[in-house]
Amino acid sequence: MNIVIIDTGCANLSSVKFAFDRLGYQAKISRDLNQIQQADKLLLPGVGTAAAAIKNLTDRNLIETIRQLTQPVLGICLGMQLMTEFSAEGNLATLNLMSGHTDLIPDTGLPLPHMGWNQVRYQADHPLFADIEQDSHFYFVHSYAVLPNENTIASCNYGVPFSAALGYKNFYGVQFHPERSGKAGAQLLKNFVEKI
């Protein structure tokens, strides 16, 4: 299995790679267009701001390559948010791989960023969540979120409900960090490789 972690220039690349190492998969970090196009499965990780990540992807000539991918792609955290049409963080157009907007989590008196473990409720029988107990806890760190829409395959609540996972065609995204979410996160990465 040829797994490529797209080198977005963000800080969590190595921890995503180590998560695959622990599962016994070889994943490589690359910004090489040929390696990305030839991968069986791809990951789009991201931490930091949407503007910085889009700038990195633009500077590396990766935007059009990502838009044309036909193999399964999993966005993680900011990587998921970049898959939508627009981010209010910097007010900029994002990759437009699926409908949806990324907005600041509404103020309900809870501290931002939303940081720590929270329950995720997923669409029954979705292969990304195979063998993961319903309402399992995953690890989140974010201030912006995609409110539930037609592409939401899992949701979470932090004062308001928001999308914990999205899916459209070959593009999937999770707002949480599976690489930091223990057994449930490891199972999700395994499902992405083996069942998607």
Image (cartoon, rainbow, N blue to C red):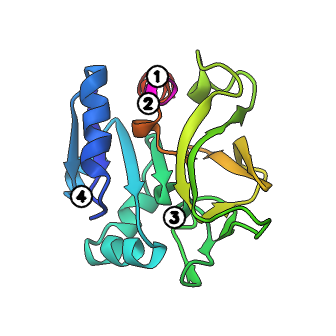
Read off the magenta span. Answer: 182-186
How far is mark 4 from mark 1, CA to CA?
Answer: 32 Å
Mark 2 → mark 1, Cα distance in angstroms? 10 Å
Inspect the image, locate mark 4, and give the three-letter code of the amino acid beneath it: Leu
Residue in the image at 31% along x and 73% along y: 56
Q: Position of residue 99 (x, y in %)?
A: 69, 62
Vertically, is 88 above or below 169? below
- Mark 3 lies on residue: 82
Closer to the eye: label 1 or 3? 1
- How many C-alpha atoms fall within 10 Å of the one at disc 2: few (<14), some, or many (≥20)? many
Task: Pick whichever, 68 or 134, lies toward us.
Answer: 134
- The mark closer to the camera, 2 or 1, is 1
**Residue position marked by numbered label 2 in the rendering:** 189
- Residue 65 falls left or right of residue 135: left
Which residue is at 76% across, 70% downward?
Answer: 107
Q: Quadrant of the N terminus?
A: top left
- Is tag 2's residue or tag 3's residue first in the polypeptide sequence? 3
Placement of 130 over or under 74, stated as above or below: above
Q: Which mark is residue 33?
A: 4
Q: Secondary structure beneath disc 4?
A: helix
Query: Disc 1 marks which amino acid?
Result: Lys
Query: Would you call the spot at circle 1 few (<14 residues within 10 Å), some (14-19), or many (20 or more)?
Result: some
User: What residue does disc 1 label?
Assistant: 183
What kind of residue is marked 3?
Leu
